[in-house]
């Protein structure tokens, strides 16, 4: 296996993006390099970090270090851009609704709601634990999705943030609680074991 120099990395990245119409993800580029038996490099060297093969993080780290810009939606043309904008608007609407409520909603649930609104066939994988199909989100923040990442999903409150916000609201409410504090938080957020006494 050959280590890749920064110069060669840039050259191959240009070739790869040309093949992908400037829409190639870091994950796809990692696979592209791995198929060519190219390794990232060694710690502290200008060739990269210690890894046996590339992954999305090592590709992203190298791109950032070399100042190679991330392919953006601005390079998507016509109906693809319109479709992506529509999806992002629907995601934002569901994220706002979830952030304004007390119940914790996961990124996967947001994706499922948007997919259902668009009448898309659910994406499933076989669970290694049960051997049965389980639904997985089409729209994710870091990789995947029909046109790559949807970082807008990072705007969704995390489970910890949701619990913290409900706790703050309870502390300023005037009405006395009829149940234990922790039980009220669990009911409102439906966050399960994240809430401790």
Image (cartoon, rainbow, N blue to C red):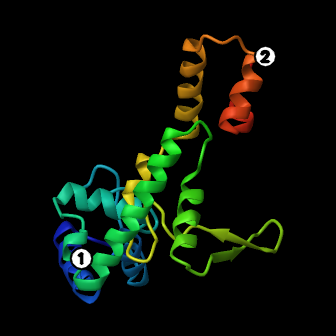
Q: Is residue 45 above or below residue 39?
A: above
Residue drawn 29% across the image and 84% down it:
79
Earlier along the polypeptide chain: callout 2 or callout 1?
1
Residue at numbered disc 2:
178
Residue drawn 24% across the image and 76% down it:
13
| Quadrant of the rendered image containing residue 86 | bottom left
Residue drawn 79% across the image and 16% down it:
178
Q: Is residue 18 above or below residue 139?
A: below
In the image, which disc is placed on residue 13?
A: 1
Report the number of numbered marks: 2
Q: Is residue 97 above or below residue 8?
A: above
Give x and y (percent) for residue 4: 28, 71
Which circle, 2 or 1, is nearer the viewer?
Answer: 2
Give x and y (percent) for residue 147: 38, 75
Q: Secondary structure at mark 1?
A: helix
Left or right: where 18 falls relative to 61: left
| Quadrant of the rendered image containing residue 21 | bottom left
- State the residue lying farthest toward the bottom: 19
Count neighbours of disc 1 (C-alpha within 10 A) and say few if under 14, some if 14 to 19, many if 20 or more: many
Residue 121 in sight here: yes
Give x and y (percent) for residue 25: 35, 72
Q: Secondary structure at mark 2?
A: loop
Residue 149 in sight here: no
Residue drawn 24% across the image and 65% down it:
70
Tell me the CA gap for discs 2 and 1. Answer: 61 Å
């Amino acid at each position: 296996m050959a280590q890749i120099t920064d110069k060669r990395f840039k050259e191959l990245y240009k070739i790869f993006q040309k093949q992908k119409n400037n829409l190639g993800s870091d994950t796809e580029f990692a696979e592209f390099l791995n198929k060519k038996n190219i390794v990232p490099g060694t710690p502290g060297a200008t060739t990269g970090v210690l890894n046996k093969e590339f992954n999305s993080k090592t590709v992203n780290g190298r791109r950032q270090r070399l100042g190679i810009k991330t392919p953006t939606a601005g390079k998507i043309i016509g109906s693809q851009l319109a479709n992506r904008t529509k999806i992002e608007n629907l995601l934002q609407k569901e994220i706002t609704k979830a952030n304004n409520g007390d119940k914790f909603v996961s990124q996967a649930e947001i994706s499922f709601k948007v997919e259902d609104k668009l009448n898309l066939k659910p994406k499933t994988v076989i669970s290694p634990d049960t051997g049965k199909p389980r639904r997985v989100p089409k729209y994710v923040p870091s990789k995947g999705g029909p046109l790559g990442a949807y970082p807008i999903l990072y705007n969704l409150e995390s489970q910890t943030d949701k619990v913290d916000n409900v706790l703050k609201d309870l502390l300023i409410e005037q009405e006395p609680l009829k149940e234990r504090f922790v039980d009220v938080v669990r009911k409102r957020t439906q966050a399960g074991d994240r809430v401790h006494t």
